[in-house]
């Protein structure tokens, strides 16, 4: 069974520090990798996606993909209290437009 | 201006009742999805549709049915609701060659 694993947390990070969120996946043939943010009781919203090995930066966010080790991570620089949320990792195993979702990591940014 | 809307936003019903959750989108996307989310669990796919004539079962379709009335509308029905269908339900859309999905605001369903 294709799986996406995340540490449920909570991960507590001081304001202004770097938050590092990790995700591993089981299907070596996975094509696309997504990070979504979800505030409590709200819908997931896309932060960024990555397709190729290496780093992809967008503002304070950096996604890192290592297909050989089958993990994808999200770094949040200069963490703000508004970054406190659950972060969902999602993976497309076969580029068939279906996403396999991790259960999410709860991030708490402490002022 | 919500691109993906869901109605109702909250619903409390009783065991055995038939319930319909509706999703509409103004994004012009071909692909539409229904998910449920339970505390501590990831999003689980119930049904998905790539166009009006293409509807597919997802991971947890038992007890649910769907209707794609138009490109912009995708409804989820619970024929006879049971308490373990209490969850947060999300509709999502997608288009083009990417797998990116865009979510509606969700429907919180409670089955007593």
Image (spheres, rainbow, N blue to C red):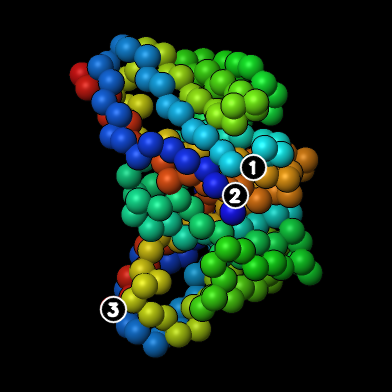
Point out residue B74 in the picture as x, y percentages from the top left corner. Answer: 62, 66
Category of crowding for the residue at label 1, using alpha-carbon neighbours closer than 10 angstroms: few (below 14), some (14–19), many (at least 20): some
| Chain for disc number 2 | A
| Chain for disc number 1 | A
Looking at this view, name the residue that lies furthest to the left: A111
Q: Residue at x 25, y 17 (%)?
A: A14
Question: Is residue B102 shown left or right of residue B110?
Answer: right
Category of crowding for the residue at label 2, using alpha-carbon neighbours closer than 10 angstroms: few (below 14), some (14–19), many (at least 20): few
Q: Secondary structure at mark 3?
A: loop
Q: CA distance from mark 3 to mark 2?
A: 33 Å
Residue at which label 3 appears = B112
Residue at which label 1 appears = A27
Residue A86, placed above or below residue A73: below
Q: Secondary structure at mark 1?
A: loop
| Chain for disc number 3 | B
Residue A96, placed above or below residue A13: below
Point out residue B110 in the picture as x, y percentages from the top left corner. Answer: 33, 70
């Amino acid at each position: 069974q294709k799986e996406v694993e995340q540490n449920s947390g909570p991960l507590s990070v001081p304001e202004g520090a770097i938050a590092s969120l990790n995700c591993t996946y089981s299907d070596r043939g996975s094509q696309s990798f997504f990070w979504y943010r979800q505030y409590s009781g709200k819908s997931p919203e896309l932060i960024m996606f990555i397709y190729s090995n290496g780093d992809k930066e967008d503002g304070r966010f950096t996604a890192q993909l290592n297909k050989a080790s089958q993990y994808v991570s999200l770094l949040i620089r200069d963490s703000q209290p508004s970054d406190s949320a659950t972060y969902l990792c999602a993976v497309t195993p076969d580029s068939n437009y279906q996403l396999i979702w991790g259960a999410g990591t709860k991030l708490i940014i402490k002022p | 201006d919500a691109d993906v809307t869901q109605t109702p936003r909250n619903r409390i019903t009783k065991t055995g009742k038939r319930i319909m959750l509706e999703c509409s989108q103004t994004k012009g996307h071909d692909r539409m999805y229904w998910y449920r989310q339970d505390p501590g669990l990831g999003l689980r796919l119930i049904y998905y549709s790539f166009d009006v004539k293409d509807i597919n079962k997802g991971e947890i379709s038992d007890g649910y049915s769907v209707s794609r009335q138009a490109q912009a509308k995708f409804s989820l029905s619970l024929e006879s609701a049971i308490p373990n269908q209490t969850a947060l339900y999300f509709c999502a859309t997608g288009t083009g060659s990417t797998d990116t999905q865009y979510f509606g605001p969700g429907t919180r369903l409670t089955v007593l």
